[in-house]
Image: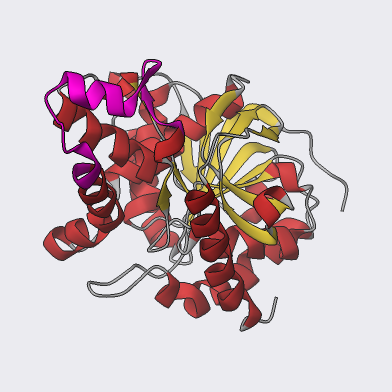
Amino acid sequence: MEAKMVNDRKVAVIGCGFVGAASAFSLMQSGLFSEMVLIDADKDKAEGEALDIAHGIPFARQMKIYAGDYDDIMDSAIIIITAGANQKPGETRLDLVNKNVGIFKSIIPEIKKRNYQGILLIVANPVDILTYTAIKLSGMPQNRVIGSGTVLDTARLKYILGEELTVDSRSVHAFIIGEHGDSEIAAWSSANISGVPLGTFCKMRGLDDYEDKLVEIAEDVKNSAYEIIKRKKATYYGIALSVKRICEAIIRDEDSVLPISSMMHGEYGIEDISLSMPAIVGRNGIETRVPIALSDLEVEKLQESAGRLKEVVKGLEI
């Protein structure tokens, strides 16, 4: 099929559950787009969300929001895929894998056969496995298939560190890397507060035994989703704002450094699996990965995280 020219002012969201609807709501308020198409297996759900969000347009910026199908979205600058089963209390992101790979096997071929030329942003969980699946099934250039990865985990880390150190979380420079899930790693070696090494800043704030505190913080970040799901059955606001942030970097061609999920090609001895590392993100998707400083232990943990994801991929028919 002949490829459609991409419209930089248009976005599509596939999947209108909690995450899809919250992402659409966040994007409506962002002013990044003038047209948004919502797709869901339940067309009534997509139409309901489109109507509900559209009624807020008089309070925001002029925009066209409607429910559609695959033919309606092929000129979108970004197609965001949030479709998938929800993570239930007590369930890990990897537990979702077979259900959601199955769903992707119905979605991605629809996009592939229409020769889509924009950027695919994968948000559904387990995001690393599904980004890998989307790359394999779509045949698209790898720079144009991005997983939301550990963008939210990194925001959680910055928020908690900011609270602990009584400093603006936007001044905290630290990344969560690896799997968006139980084997994720806090990359403490490269962490700093506006250029001041993290350890130095902790001592300045009276946290002399900060190493134990950092272990606790990393655990809190890792368990954040479980804690939220236990209390309110789903997480969606944080990820919706992460989606908006990634879209901003792409549409504004910001060349921002974000820890998105993408295919590894030998970095740190890891290849043929998708996981999160900081990368420069702009109009064409991923420009290049950013080689942050990691300790030997962090590299070892990153390789373990990759190994865990590879084991899951082995059992899938992609």
Where residue 87 appears, as percent x and y from the top left, is: 33, 68
Q: Which residue is drawn at 15% across and 32% down?
A: 208
Tell whether 73 sits left or right of 15: right
Task: Indicate yes or no whether the magenta region holds residue 196.
Answer: yes
Tell whether 274 sits left or right of 137: left
Q: Which of 140 and 227 is in front in this view?
A: 227
Q: Which residue sits furthest right?
A: 2
Q: Quadrant of residue 117?
A: top right
Where residue 161 appears, as percent x and y from the top left, is: 24, 33
Q: Which of 225 and 122 is in front in this view?
A: 225
Tell whether 264 sits left or right of 66: right
Q: Nearer the viewer, residue 168 or 206?
A: 206
Q: Which residue is drawn at 51% across and 62% down?
A: 305
Where residue 246 appears, as percent x and y from the top left, is: 51, 34
Task: Indicate yes or no whether the magenta region holds residue 161.
Answer: no
Tell whether 165 sits left or right of 268: left
Q: Which colour scheme is used?
A: secondary structure
- In this rendering, the count of numbered labels is 0
Which quadrant is home to the C terminus?
bottom right
Which stretch is magenta? 190-213
Image vertical order of residue 105 relative to residue 232, above or below: below
Q: Can residue 245 be seen in this view?
A: yes
Q: Residue at x 57, y 65 (%)?
A: 129
Where residue 309 appears, as percent x and y from the top left, is: 55, 68
Q: In which quarter of the image is residue 166?
A: top left
Q: In which quarter of the image is residue 108?
A: bottom right
Q: Is residue 24 visible?
A: no
